[in-house]
Image (cartoon, coloured by chain):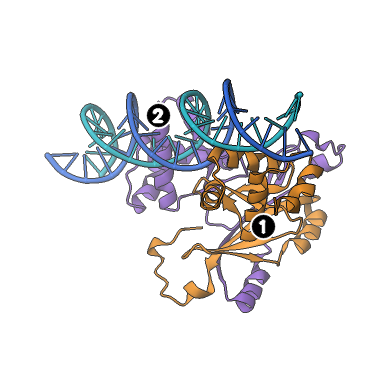
Chain colours: A purple, B orange, C blue, D cyan
Amino acid sequence: MDQNSKYKELLNREGIKSTRHRNSILELLEESKLPMTAEQLFIALKDKTSSIDLSTVYRTLDTFASKNLVIKTTRNDDGKALYELNHNEHKHHLLCVKCHKLISIEDCPIGELKETLKNKIDFDITGHKLEIYGYCHDCKNLNYDSKNDERP
Amino acid sequence: MDQNSKYKELLNREGIKSTRHRNSILELLEESKLPMTAEQLFIALKDKTSSIDLSTVYRTLDTFASKNLVIKTTRNDDGKALYELNHNEHKHHLLCVKCHKLISIEDCPIGELKETLKNKIDFDITGHKLEIYGYCHDCKNLNYDSKNDERP
DNA sequence: GTCGTTGCAAATTCTTTGCACCTGA
DNA sequence: TCAGGTGCAAAGAATTTGCAACGAC
């Protein structure tokens, strides 16, 4: 019960029990820093000591999402849901379409738009999601061989 | 074969036949202006004269997406794919978290960010996806009873 | 001991596919 | 005519659910 204490307080604060699986899932998500699918988590967990059922992974992620501990998203097309830890900092990512590197940025261009929309069409922004695709420093200078690049 | 001619040229240009269903689907997507699920299209088409199979809707949309006539996306959580006509204009949407209305906007705040990122971290933006959540005109003045609202 | 959590299996939902028949060019 | 499009039924993939056993407090 070494690691358990690490997330126990967090979980209790949300009114849910601290369990082996819940702790492991939080730990994995924290390590990964990037959004993961339920299946990725499932596989990573099977490799560890624990043996876990896929439905438990889904249930746990659902619970976490409802408590806002994780954020559920879906990237284009593939149809699989992604889950990432909800650090409450506001952040956007750049995704390199060539090497698939993910880069965090501080910039957020929504601020001005917020005012514009409020005045123009009376819409109150409460949140947003922005993903940016392109070529990172390392890849932009390689030949642009876009044949196998993912389409944003 | 009144309407057929309307999209025939477009379809032929992409090397695919103009058929009753294909024309209807293009027409519906054009009318709707907003992304639709395969099922929404299916229901709308059944109500019309035609009788169509859901698998045909999916196949048609797939074909269109591969020709870049439509764009396939997935909104948060619900897990259903959305399809919208690919006018090559750039557009974003506002999603009201209360009534789930979807509003198109012309504004796009990425322009300036593009330069900033290029200079700051040498990243070449090629595309992006932006979704904005909030309260629309009709809902913002109702009580903010956020209990049952979908969380962005 | 109690109530929430989990495993297991089965159900559901969304989407894809195989194949025979139909249709547009 | 004939390759390509469509309906139907069945398969597949991702996710959810019912229920009995288990585990945290």
Q: Which residue is mark 1?
A: B30
- The front one of A143 and A9 is A143
Q: Which mark is residue A52?
A: 2
Q: Is residue A79 above or below residue B135?
A: above
Element type where label 2 sits in the image: loop
**Residue A46 at x, y percent in the picture:** 45, 26
State the image quarter where residue A112 is shown. bottom right
**Amino acid residing under circle 1:** Glu
Q: Which mark is residue A119?
A: none
Is residue A101 visible to the viewer in this orientation of the structure? no
Q: Residues within 10 Å of mark 2 (few under 14, many from 20)?
A: some
Q: Is residue A144 above or below residue A71?
A: above
Q: Residues within 10 Å of mark 1 (few under 14, many from 20)?
A: some
Give the left or right position of residue A130, taking residue A88 as reference: right
Cα distance in 3D space between marks 2 and 1: 47 Å
- The front one of A6 and C3 is C3
**Residue A12 at x, y percent in the picture:** 34, 49
At 80% from the left and 34% from the top, the residue drawn is: A147
At 40% from the left and 26% from the top, the residue drawn is: A51
**Amino acid residing under circle 2:** Ile
